[in-house]
């Protein structure tokens, strides 16, 4: 019976125990959860193959992008920078047969290889002589390519057919894990965009699990909790300062948790700040229950926080760019957006009321509004609050 890459199964079994193979496969999937993805797997392969370097290219380098490469071995950042900027274009060990483990000597004559620019300028200083690798291509129509490379120094030996077979057994698992990684990366990017947009608008977000424990919160929510004038943490759980507000808030949280299995729930509450200016408005909404979230600490409820005392402020640079305002006109518009009157804004800017009126008329003409209240609404609802 033949194994992957042509090696017989008994030979492969003799070189690698079943437990070792299972351990390597486990590291393939554990790599999804590592801070440096697949660092554990690559280090295990380095030891398994007696290699000096093992690398996994997750995003290919280009003229505009240095790419994303995870590798184990002695770090040589300046040499890697040379490869990412130019030498990748003359690398002969690329565009390999799809999902197939290949040896370097199968692609290029030994003398031609040793005389090549990429070997002399890049690989020889790294003590790379023998190479084995595979190009893993996605099946989801996105034309993504991932590259696994294993290398040995000149004093080593060429890779064997048994080692090729072991690497080949790992490829289907690595391909599946890379597809999951790409999906999780898209989800995480969407989450970062959502959280970042909320923060730029001055909106706090807190995710709670079914027990009411915090799963995640953004910077705005952290600041609100640190202030402790309306909402705080007590024994790891949220607590409104006012006992009456606290009972109402937790009633809504429990209702939202129960609402996950139905049509969902969206409720709101304004929390008292003990007589201070403004209030903290809280939107409580349930997060629909998914099959994957049944067994684990998944978010069940989201609290959206808005502090009326700290509204989102428009950006002067975006105002000037969007409506072709002068610096003086943009400064006045920002102050009006903060809720100041025209007289207060003029005083803050150190200009006369008549000058402020002149600027305001220009702002009206350029933004297409006719009243100060309409201007404030425009500023709060446009992209100028997202800078």
Image (tube, rainbow, N blue to C red):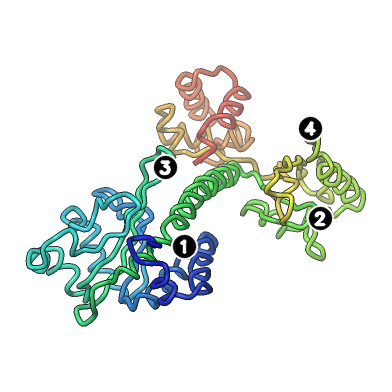
Residue at the image position 47 percent from the left and 34 percent from the top: 330
Residue 37 numbered tag? 1
The relative height of residue 132 versus residue 207 in the rendered view (above or below) is below
Mark 1 lies on a secondary structure that is loop
In the image, taking residue 93 as reference, residue 67 lies left or right, namely right
Residue 263 numbered tag? 4
The alpha-carbon separation of the residues under discs 1 and 4 comes to 38 Å
Camera-near label (2 vs 3) is: 3
Residue 350 numbered tag? none
Q: Tell which circle, 1 or 4, labels the residue nearer the N-terminal end.
A: 1
User: Residue 208 at what x, y percent from top left?
Assistant: 74, 52
The alpha-carbon separation of the residues under discs 3 and 4 comes to 36 Å
Residue 139 numbered tag? 3
Q: Tell which circle, 2 or 3, labels the residue nearer the N-terminal end.
A: 3
Mark 3 lies on a secondary structure that is loop
Say if mark 4 contacts mark 2, CB within 8 Å: no
Camera-near label (3 vs 4) is: 3
Residue carrying label 2: 211
User: Residue 356 at what x, y percent from top left?
Assistant: 51, 30
Camera-near label (1 vs 3) is: 3
Mark 4 lies on a secondary structure that is loop
């Amino acid at each position: 019976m033949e194994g992957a890459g042509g090696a017989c199964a008994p030979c492969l079994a003799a070189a690698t125990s079943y437990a070792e193979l299972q351990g390597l496969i486990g590291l393939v999937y554990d790599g999804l959860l590592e801070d440096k993805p697949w660092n554990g797997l690559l280090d295990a392969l380095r030891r398994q193959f007696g290699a000096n370097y093992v690398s996994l290219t997750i995003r290919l380098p280009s003229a505009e992008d240095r790419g994303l490469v995870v590798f184990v071995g002695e770090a040589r950042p300046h040499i890697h920078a040379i490869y990412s900027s130019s030498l990748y274009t003359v690398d002969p060990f690329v565009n390999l047969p799809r999902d197939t483990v290949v040896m370097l000597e199968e692609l290029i004559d030994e003398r031609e290889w040793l005389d090549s620019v990429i070997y002399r300028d890049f690989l020889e200083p790294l003590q790379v002589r023998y190479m084995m690798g595979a190009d893993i291509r996605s099946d989801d129509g996105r034309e993504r390519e991932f590259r696994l490379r294993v290398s040995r120094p000149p004093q080593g030996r060429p890779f064997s057919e048994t080692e090729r077979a072991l690497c080949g057994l790992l490829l289907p698992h690595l391909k599946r894990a890379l597809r999951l990684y790409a999906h999780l990366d898209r989800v995480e990017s969407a989450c970062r965009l959502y959280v970042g947009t909320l923060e730029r608008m001055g909106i706090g977000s807190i995710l709670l699990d079914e027990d009411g424990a915090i799963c995640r919160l953004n910077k705005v929510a952290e600041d609100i909790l640190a202030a402790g004038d309306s909402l705080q943490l007590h024994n790891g759980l949220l607590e409104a300062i006012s006992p009456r507000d606290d009972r109402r808030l937790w009633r809504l949280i429990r209702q939202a948790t129960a609402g996950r299995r139905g049509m969902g729930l969206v409720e709101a509450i304004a929390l008292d700040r003990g007589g201070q200016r403004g209030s903290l408005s809280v939107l409580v909404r349930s997060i629909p229950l998914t099959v994957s979230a049944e067994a684990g600490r998944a978010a069940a409820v989201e609290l959206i926080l808005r502090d009326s005392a700290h509204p989102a402020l428009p950006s002067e640079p975006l105002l000037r760019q969007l409506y072709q305002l002068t610096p003086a006109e943009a400064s006045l518009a920002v102050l009006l957006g903060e809720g100041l009157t025209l007289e207060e804004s003029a005083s803050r800017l150190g200009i006369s009321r008549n000058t402020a009126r002149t600027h305001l008329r220009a702002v009206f003409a350029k933004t297409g509004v006719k009243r100060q209240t309409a201007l404030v609404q425009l500023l709060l609802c446009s992209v100028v609050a997202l800078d």
